[in-house]
Amino acid sequence: MKKIIITTLFIAFYFLPINLNAEIKKISEGNVDAKIKIIVFESLTCSHCANFHKNVYPGLKENFIDRGYVYIEFRNFPLDMAAMNASKIAHCRNDGNSEILHYLFNNQDQWVKGKSIEELNENIKKYIKKSEFKIDVEKCLASKEAEDHILEDRIEGAKKFKIDSTPTLIINGEKFDNPTNYKKLKKFIEKMI
């Protein structure tokens, strides 16, 4: 009987999708093999980043990402602890999907409130609980793997691309000036196609 129990446990653990040291997936959209690759370094508490998501991203998605011309990665560059915690929530499902990220940016004015990090954390928790996302916010905030991933993004951005403000767009390895002007971005991308 003991052998049967041990064998059953071994089989169960062998086939269970356990991610003890799971690599955190990058949040991205589009065709991985697209000719144009964009990296956006952003902070979830940055109002200019929220503006990018509300006013630039929709045109970029419709005209270039959905048509297979552009692959985009949303990288973390938190400017404060509230942005760090929001980034952990955006990565909570670890599926690479951008849905929670866009939700947080599009509703930034609803949850970025508070005089302390504790108040900000409570506001984002309440806001996420009102959403349709079925995530455990406490577990997200406690994720050391997500925190490491976010910090690695920030370090890479500062070292490799000399990022000093958000949002910063890197298009095929080069910084793009004025990332919140969709007309300029559209013209630039059209020349590359």
Image (spheres, helix red, strand yellow):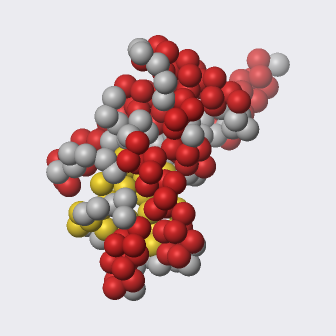
Q: Relative to residue 41, is residue 4 drawn left or right?
A: right
Q: Is residue 12 above or below residue 100?
A: above
Residue at position x 63%, y 31% in the image: 128
Which residue occupies the extreme right position in the image? 1
Return the x and y of residue 49 as percentages of the image width and height. 40, 48
* Residue 19 horizontal/vertical position (percent): 55, 36
Report the residue at 82% width, 19% height from top. Answer: 1
Seen in the picture, residue 89 relative to 180 is either above or below; the reply is above
Q: Residue at x 23, y 67 (%)?
A: 174
Residue situated in front as seen by the camera: 170 or 160? 170
Q: Position of residue 55 (x, y in %)?
A: 49, 59
Residue 135 figure quarter? top right
143 is higher (above) or lower (below) than 19? above
Residue 175 placement, left or right of 187 = left
Vertical arrangement, residue 130 with respect to residue 179, above or below: above
Query: Position of 169 compared to 85: left or right?
Result: left
- Residue drawn at x 33%, y 42% is 77
Location of residue 190 in the rendering, given as x and y in whole percent from the top left corner: 39, 83
Left/right placement of residue 135 relative to residue 154 reads right
